Amino acid sequence: MSKYKAPSYHKDEFNCPRCEVRSPQKWYKIYRPKSDDTPIMNKVVSTPGSFTGQTLHGSWSVDISICQFCSEYSLWEKGVLLYPFQTELPDAHPDMPNEVKGIYEEATKVFKHSPRAAAALLRLAIETMIPLIEEYEIEKAKLNTMIGILVQKGIPDHIQQGLDTIRIYGNEGIHPGEIVLNDDEEIVFYMFELINDMIEELISRKTKIRKAYAKIPADKIKGILNRDRNSKPKD
Ligand SMILES: [Zn+2]
């Protein structure tokens, strides 16, 4: 298998953002020439290996690379890949409920253009997630209230802190100047990891332990129950 080569502007070969196969790319430029009323012109300016780097006269231009394996196009502007949108954000946790996953994926799509919008969506994602955790039987309410109930039900401190971090950073009502998320993509990037950690802690880990525990033979369970009954402090 050939080594992965990230998509790169005007390169003859890379892993296609569409099919992910490392394959030759043909480059095209679409541009609107200056002082020319003709509609958008479409002209081949480059084929693999022959791009000269010449600048075309035009008030604007975009480039298209066409994958020679899948024949799909990718769209570039000023040397940056615009479409398909590529992100290094983590994938949604496999145990993330579907309703939550839809919101999470929407957040990954807007992240590049507006970290603040992504943070607000992640907040909505945990707001949607909490009532879905069967274990805690929490009715839909304000996020702050629901986290408070989880705390009463004994969630560990670090989970409360994770949930509150997403709640606060994702709050659209934050006063201007308090937290400038559009200047701090790193925090929002971390929020994506954090929400996956919350799923792991609140849903996956418990399910895994429960499944393993359910396989313990009945007589052993009886022994465990006896032990705990006997070890309870006496009044
Ligand atoms: Zn391709």
Image: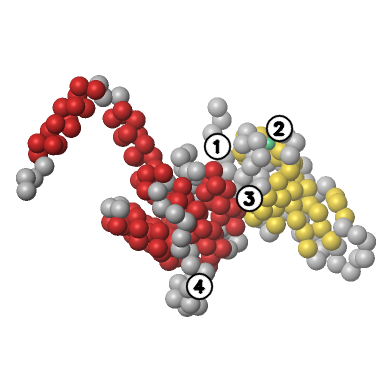
Question: Relative to residue 101, is residue 149 depicted above or below?
Answer: below
Q: Nearer the viewer, mark 4 or mark 2?
A: 4
Image check: 186 left or right of 212? Answer: right
Q: Which residue is mark 1?
A: 4
Q: Nearer the viewer, residue 91 or 20?
A: 91
Q: Earlier in the sequence, mark 3 or mark 1?
A: 1
> What is the spatial separation of the Cα atoms under label 3 and label 1, in whole angstroms?
18 Å
Establish whether ligand 1 lies closer than 8 Å to the Cβ of label 2: yes
Cα separation, mark 2 vs mark 3, equals 19 Å
The residue shown at (57%, 48%) is: 102
Question: From the viewer's perspective, is residue 38 above or below residue 49?
Answer: below
Dot 1 falls on a residue whose secondary structure is: loop
- Name the residue carrying label 4: 173
- Seen in the image, is 63 located left or right of residue 194? right
Left or right for 134, reference 221: right
Q: Is residue 189 visible?
A: no
Residue ranking furthest to the left = 234
Name the residue: 9% across, 36% down.
230
Q: Is mark 1 within 8 Å of ligand 1?
A: no
The quarter of the picture where residue 54 lies is bottom right
Number of numbered discs on residues: 4
Question: Which residue bears the numbered disc 3?
Answer: 85
Please say if the residues under marks 4 and 1 sit with CB atoms less than 8 Å apart.
Answer: no
Give how far apart the Cα atoms at labels 2 and 1 are: 15 Å
What is the secondary structure assignment of the residue under circle 3? loop
Residue type indicated by callout 4: Gly
Q: Quadrant of residue 226?
A: top left
- The amino acid at mark 2 is Phe
Q: Quadrant of the N terminus?
A: top right
